[in-house]
Each structure stands twice: as C-alpha cells, then as structure tokens.
Image (cartoon, rainbow, N blue to C red):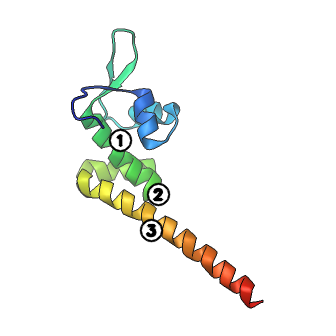
Amino acid sequence: MQPDKLYYTIGEVANMYKVKHSLIRFWEKEFAIIHLHKSSKGNRLFTKKDLETFEKIYHLVKVRGYTLEGAKKALKVKEELPLVSTSKIIRKEEELKKRLIDLRLKLEQLKQSLH
C-alpha cells in the first residue's frame, strides 16, 4: 500500500492479495462494508479503508478458514484483532508454515537415511 495513493484499481488489489479479480468483485458484493467507487471510465476503485477491510476478510476467510457468513459476523461484532496485529499474524503464520515444511523434508530425509 502506497501512503500517498488515494485509490487502488481492482488489479492492484488482486495482486496485493494474490487472488483473482473475480474474488475481489465477489467479496465486494458479499460484504456491504466495502464501498465501491468507480472512475469516470467505470473502473472499480478502492480506498485504503477498503484495503483494510479486504485484509481482514482475506485473513478470516483464506487464513483462518471462516465461512463467508462467519466472516461477516466476525466483522460485524468486531471480534477480530486490529489490522496491524492481523498483518503481523499473517506474516508469522506464513513463516511458521515454511518452517514446518522444511522440518517435514528434513524428517523425511532422516527417515530415508536410516533405511
């Protein structure tokens, strides 16, 4: 996210979260808390606040495995952690996942060397 930028295109948002444009459009329709803006050409534009909302939705649905209804409820009652903490959690989870994969590979190599 660039600090001086006011709006982001759907392509930029999709690239940030490594998802398809169709998922961004789907979430935009499903979650009423995302406020759609359009350029004079009709292109979707998202604000920093929308990006924060997308990050929360992404974390709930893709990382934590919530259903859409569960994510909607969590966002509505604000049970989730603040955005800054959520970002840190996502990075930590990714680091842990990589470490676990490395450990699994090392265990498999050790197992094969014993046979």
| Element on which disc 2 rests | loop
> Is disc 1 surrounded by few (<14), some (14 to 19) or many (20+) residues within 10 Å?
many
Q: Position of residue 38 (x, y in %)?
A: 34, 17
**Height in image: 92 above or below 83?**
below
- Which residue is the site of mark 1? 54
- Which residue is the site of mark 2? 65
Depth check, mark 1 against mark 2: the one in front is 1
Q: CA distance from mark 1 to mark 3?
A: 23 Å
Q: Amino acid at mark 3?
A: Leu
Which of 112/68 is in front? 112
| Disc on the earlier residue, 1 or 3 | 1
**Residue 42 appears in the rendering:** yes
Residue at 21 percent of width and 30 percent of height: 4
| Disc on the earlier residue, 1 or 2 | 1
- Left or right: 33 in relation to 92: left
Residue at 32 percent of width and 35 percent of height: 32
Are the two marked residues, 3 and 2, in contact with CB atoms closer than 8 angstroms?
Answer: no
- Which residue is the site of mark 3? 96
Furthest residue toward front:
113
Which of 5/26 is in front? 5
Splitting the image into 4 quarters, where does residue 33 fall?
top left
Are the two marked residues, 1 and 2, in contact with CB atoms closer than 8 angstroms?
Answer: no
For the image shown, how many numbered marks are present on the structure? 3
Q: Amino acid at mark 1?
A: Phe
> Is disc 3 surrounded by few (<14), some (14 to 19) or many (20+) residues within 10 Å?
few
Q: Position of residue 83 (x, y in %)?
A: 26, 51
